[in-house]
Image: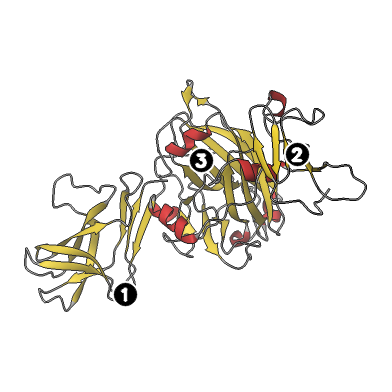
Amino acid sequence: MKFARLAGALLVAFTAAALIINAPGLLRAAGDYPGLPQVGIPQYQFPTGTEVVPADTGLAGGVFPQTVTMPPSVIAGTTWGSPRNFLGNGALNITNTQGTATVTCATTSAATTAALSADRWMCDANVGSGAGNTAIVTTAPAPPAGFTNVMKVNRASGSLTQPICVWSAVPTVQAAQLAGQTVTLSAYVAALATLTADNGNVANLVIIAGSGTDQGLNASWTASPAITPAWTSIATVVNTPILLTTTFARFSTTTAIPATVGASLPVTEVGVGLCFTPTANTVGVTAATDGFAWTGAQLEKAPAASLFEFRAKAQENLEAQYYIYALKEGAATTTRAMCMASTTTLAICGLKFPVAMYKVPTMSYATGFATATTTAGSTLGACTTLRTSTLVTGNAPSNEGVLVDCVAGTVPAAGSADYLADNAGTGIIWAWTGL
């Protein structure tokens, strides 16, 4: 029954004993409607979708108060807190790491930043017989209403009879909140054109749990066919197959995260995966369209999927930099860091991260950038090598910054001031916590 009118906003609140309705001129205490189920007692611990809410709907022929049925997605969206989504960058708006480039999934070794397609999301195939690809696109396929980006996940080569997955990990300080709780994982997913000829348009929604502390996605991985990070006491909580079409639809799976795993160790790590498994019969199936596309991933503490929680891009970008930071070289000569010449071929540069990162990151580099070649600073020489500084024995990054070595053909005299600059190349400095 839909609302014809409702006098003011309807506020639904849960107490330990009952569902209480509060609207202007209407306040009903627990027990006023003995025929209605009460949320909070054991048999109605979570909304079921059959709860009825007294309301002045103004419909003809009714006796006040009339009732309306509220689906659990609406109730979950108004009572389970905000932010609801435990996943970062679920709408894929932050692509600082790789932009829209095609990314090759990690295989049998630990993932690096090269396997990240969008910030906080990495791809792994974990077999050496082939590879998977991901890419962020804005068309082909077009995103569902409300979204601007989707991620394509496809087979790149080989028959790959193992899953190809994209993964995101929840930091321990948040994952511990999910132990013993009912959660729902949801996402908008569509099949690419030839997935039906491969495996009949089947994908999977996966939730994993472990008992380690922020082991992340850049550590070692388990042997196929499990294809999960090798977390302490790793366990697959749920692996739900979903049947896709080439039109985006929202899919979800609901489960209880166990309170403990392994030898009764508390759950302190949670991750999610979106996967598909190519079959051996992929002859004649176009690899580039053998897979799926997705966006709008959400993991929430609720018995059903609520509306996707859109966040401002500025907020998501700031949060992403807490876990991963990528400094990319541009075309213009822009100063990136101040340096000091250590020798006539080495400049040591102090790089400050935009925000203090969640933990000390792992650094990686794609050669590029340049440094001044004279004390006047008027000319630039390309960095032939970029690396975490080796000047001081045991030097390592902190969660706030890192010393970077730029090895170049010529730099000013030792002890001279210098700088690191863009030089129209393809250099990248990555700092990644694995989350």
Q: Is 184 displayed left or right of 396 in the figure?
A: right
Q: Which mark is residue 49?
A: 2
Residue at far bottom of view = 378
Q: How is the image coloured?
A: secondary structure
Read off the residue under disc 3: 271
Is residue 22 at least partly visible in the picture?
A: yes
Q: Is 105 displayed left or right of 326 in the figure?
A: right
User: SS of the residue at dot 2?
Assistant: loop
Of circles 2 and 1, which is in front? 2
Disc 2 + disc 3, Cβ < 8 Å: no
Q: Is 380 displayed left or right of 40 in the figure?
A: left
Q: Which amino acid does label 3 sit on?
A: Gly
Q: Which of marks 2 and 1 is nearer the N terminus?
A: 2
Question: Residue at left 24%, top 58%?
Answer: 351
Rounded to the nearest angstrom, the CA distance separating label 3 from label 1 is 38 Å
Q: Is 145 displayed left or right of 372 in the figure?
A: right
Read off the residue under disc 1: 424
User: SS of the residue at dot 1?
Assistant: loop
Residue at far right of view = 61
Instruction: Return the x and y of residue 114 as percentages of the image width and height.
Output: 41, 55
Across the whole image, how many numbered discs are drawn on residues? 3
In this view of the protein, which residue sits in the foreground, 124 or 6? 6
Instruction: Return the x and y of residue 250 as percentages of the image width and height.
Output: 68, 51
